[in-house]
Structure formats: C-alpha cells, structure tokens
Image (tube, grey):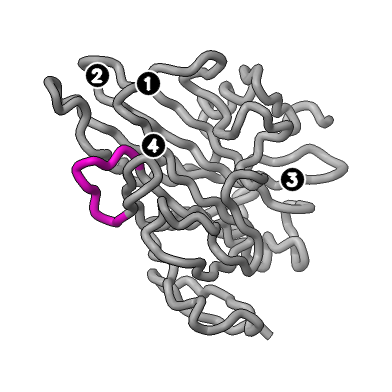
C-alpha cells in the first residue's frame, strides 16, 4: 500500500512505504496546476512547481541572486482514474510522455533554431522524459544533481511522469541592446504503440533577462508565469512539422 502525503495546494502525493520517511520531507511546492483533457474529458492535471533561480546551474534559490542566469521548474503530470492506463484509460494510451518546445530570441549555436524541440540534437525521439535529461516516473527520487536545485539530497516525488528543467542563458548569447527572452511550451502526449499519438493539454512558461547596458549586461531572470493551454498552439505544431533535427510526425503520420 502507498503512503500518502499532502503537498501544497491540496494535491495528494503517493509515496511508497519502502522509501524512508525522512526522504519525503521536502515537498513539491506548487506554482500552477493546469487541467489535462482528451476530447473535453478530464484525464489528469499538469503541475508546475514554484520557480527557482540559479547561476549557470549552481547556487540555486527561490530568490534570484545578482548573478542568476536561469530558472528551474519541476513539471509533473498526474493522471486521474479516467486517464490512468491501468484504469479507465479513456484516451487509450500505452504511456504518457512530456514534449516541450523552446522559443528563444538569443543567438544560436550552429544547427539550432529560434523555435525547436527542447531536447539534445542526438535524440532519436522528441520526448523530454529520456536519458540523459532529468525526469521521473511513478514513485521516484528527484535527480541526483542538486547543484541547480533549491533542495539538497534526493527528495521523493510520485507522479505519472515528471521532468526537471533548469534552463539558462549566459550573457555571451545575448544580443546587444535586446532583452533575452526564452519561452517554453510543455505538453502531455498520449503515446500509443499501435495507433496515432495524441497531443493533449499544455502549459506555457519562460523567463526574461532585461538588457541593462554598459558593464552590467543583462539583469537576473524574471520568471514569466505559467499559462494553461487546452491544446498545443499552432506555433508548437509548426515547430514539430518544421523540425529537421528530430522528426515527430506521430500525431499525423504513424511510424
């Protein structure tokens, strides 16, 4: 049987009794919850944690320091009874995945684009919940690297699927005279082994670093609050269609 604990905003988090209680002490701090639907039926929620700040993946804290260059979020999908693959499974999913697209106005390294699927170039699949990126499924400990996280050690989480994202942009990639603006669209995918995948609901979020000029360069990041989306935006779909790094046409043309 699972032991349950209540996290901020009243969500129920299930924790395995096999994991020592002291590991569950640091709870998920919820910043925003978004409904996830399939054909207008609720199949779960997408939970975005409270944002934190870090300096090129170090010195993480919930209050940004003067040298902060990026932000961090943990993003969890919790399926309900209607969406659970072991229960009603209304969408007929074999599993749930997280697919994220990044939009940025920064200078790019060769081969990158202002709008692209947010995974490394060598990936064969577009999903964020893949090694070596930071993710979890079911009852799991958070990623081992806590340098860019506002906690120490490995607290326990429990969700259908989760990702841990800590993006940053150093001053080197900024364009003189312009604010650095980075936005993400994070969507839940119903993955099916024998049929088309389905793109479900999403959340938009990001951060901006204001251009200060002179020796200052760019200010610390200002988090852009999460906005819930009942379905992916047209820009999200266009980015998938135009991707020449990683093709993802499963939702249009089955592999």
**125 with respect to 231 (left or right):** right
Tag 4–tag 3 contact (CB < 8 Å): no
How many numbered circles are shown?
Answer: 4
The residue positioned 60% from the left and 40% from the top of the image is 99
Determine crowd level at label 1: few under 14, some 14-19, many 20+ residues with C-alpha closer than 10 A. Answer: some
Determine crowd level at label 2: few under 14, some 14-19, many 20+ residues with C-alpha closer than 10 A. Answer: some
> Closer to the camera: disc 2 or disc 3?
2
Chain part drawn in magenta: 61-70
Query: Which tag, 2 or 1, sits closer to the chain's start?
Result: 1
Residue 105 is labelled as: 1
The answer for how far apart the CA atoms under marks 4 and 3 are is 29 Å
**108 with respect to 139 (left or right):** left
Tag 2–tag 3 contact (CB < 8 Å): no
**217 with respect to 197 (left or right):** left
Tag 1–tag 3 contact (CB < 8 Å): no
> Closer to the camera: disc 1 or disc 4?
4
Residue 178 is labelled as: 2
Query: Which tag, 2 or 4, sits closer to the chain's start?
Result: 4
The answer for how far apart the CA atoms under marks 2 and 1 are is 9 Å
The residue positioned 26% from the left and 32% from the top of the image is 209
Tag 2–tag 1 contact (CB < 8 Å): yes
Quadrant where the C terminus sits is top right
The answer for how far apart the CA atoms under marks 2 and 4 are is 16 Å
Can residue 92 be seen in the rendering of this structure? no
The residue positioned 58% from the left and 62% from the top of the image is 78
Which one is nearer the viewer's eye here, 96 or 136? 136
Residue highlighted by disc 4: 168
Residue highlighted by disc 3: 191
Query: Which tag, 1 or 4, sits closer to the chain's start?
Result: 1
SS for dot 3: strand
């Amino acid at each position: 049987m699972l032991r349950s604990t209540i996290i901020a905003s009243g969500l129920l988090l299930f924790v395995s009794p096999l994991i020592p209680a002291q590991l569950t002490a640091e709870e998920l701090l919820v910043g925003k919850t978004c409904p996830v639907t399939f054909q207008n039926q609720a199949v779960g929620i997408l939970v975005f944690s409270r944002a934190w700040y870090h300096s090129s993946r170090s010195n993480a804290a919930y209050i940004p320091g003067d040298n902060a260059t990026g932000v961090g979020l943990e993003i969890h999908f919790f399926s309900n009874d209607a969406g659970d693959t072991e229960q009603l499974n209304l969408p007929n999913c074999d599993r749930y995945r997280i697919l994220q697209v990044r939009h940025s106005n920064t200078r790019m390294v060769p081969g990158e684009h202002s709008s692209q699927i947010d995974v490394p170039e060598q990936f064969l699949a577009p999903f964020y919940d893949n090694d070596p990126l930071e993710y979890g499924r079911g009852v799991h400990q958070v990623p081992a690297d806590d340098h860019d996280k506002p906690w120490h050690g490995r607290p326990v989480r429990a969700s259908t699927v989760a990702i841990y994202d800590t993006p940053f942009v150093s001053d080197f990639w900024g364009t003189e005279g312009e604010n650095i603006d980075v936005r993400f669209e994070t969507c839940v995918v119903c993955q099916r082994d024998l049929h088309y995948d389905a793109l479900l609901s999403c959340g938009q979020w990001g951060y901006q670093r204001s251009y200060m000029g002179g020796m200052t360069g760019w200010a610390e990041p200002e988090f852009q609050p999460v906005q819930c989306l009942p379905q992916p935006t047209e820009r999200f779909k266009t980015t998938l269609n135009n991707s020449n790094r990683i093709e993802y046409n499963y939702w249009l043309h089955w592999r």
